[in-house]
Amino acid sequence: MAEENKPNENTDFTDKQWHPAEIRREDILKLLGNTKKLATMYNDLMQIKKEGWERMLEGQRKAAERKKAKNG
C-alpha cells in the first residue's frame, strides 16, 4: 500500500519540472508558406488547363461551323 500513496513521476507537477516557455509558432509560419506555394502552383496549373479547354472548345466550334457550311 505504500506504493499506492507514492505520487507517480508523470503526474508530479512541481515547479522544478515545468517552466514557462516562450511561445514560438515558426512551424505555423512555415506551414502557411508551404500552403501558399502549393495554392499558387495549383492556380497556375488550373490556368493552363483552362486555356487548353478553351482552345479545344474553340476548335470544336470551328469544326462544327465548317461541317455545317459544307453540308449547308
Image (spheres, rainbow, N blue to C red):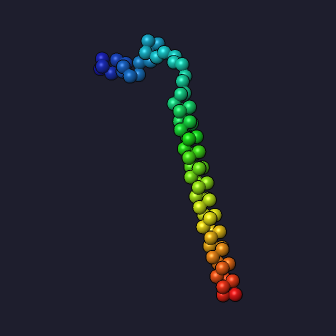
Tell me what residue is drawn at x 46 percent, y 16 percent. Answer: 18
On the rendered image, what quadrant is the C terminus found in? bottom right
- Tell me: 7 left or right of 41: left
- Counting the numbered discs, the total is 0
Q: Where is residue 53 in the image (x, y as percent from the top left)?
A: 60, 63
- Tell me: 65 left or right of 35: right
- Tell me: 65 left or right of 9: right
Tell me what residue is drawn at x 51 percent, y 30 percent. Answer: 27
Question: Where 70 sits versus 27, above or below?
Answer: below
Q: Residue 3 falls in which quadrant of the image? A: top left
Q: Where is residue 12 in the image (x, y as percent from the top left)?
A: 41, 18
- Tell me: 39 left or right of 14: right
Q: Nearer the viewer, residue 43 or 27?
A: 43
Tell me what residue is drawn at x 57 percent, y 36 percent. Answer: 32
Point out the residue furthest to the top here.
16
Question: Where 42 sits versus 70, above or below?
Answer: above
Q: Where is residue 37 in the image (x, y as percent from the top left)?
A: 56, 41
Q: Where is residue 52 in the image (x, y as percent from the top left)?
A: 59, 61
Question: Where 31 sits versus 71, above or below?
Answer: above
Q: Which of 70 and 15 is in front in this view?
A: 70
Q: Residue 71 falls in which quadrant of the image? A: bottom right
On the rendered image, what quadrant is the N terminus found in? top left
Question: Where 25 sits versus 20, above or below?
Answer: below
Tell me what residue is drawn at x 53 percent, y 28 percent. Answer: 26
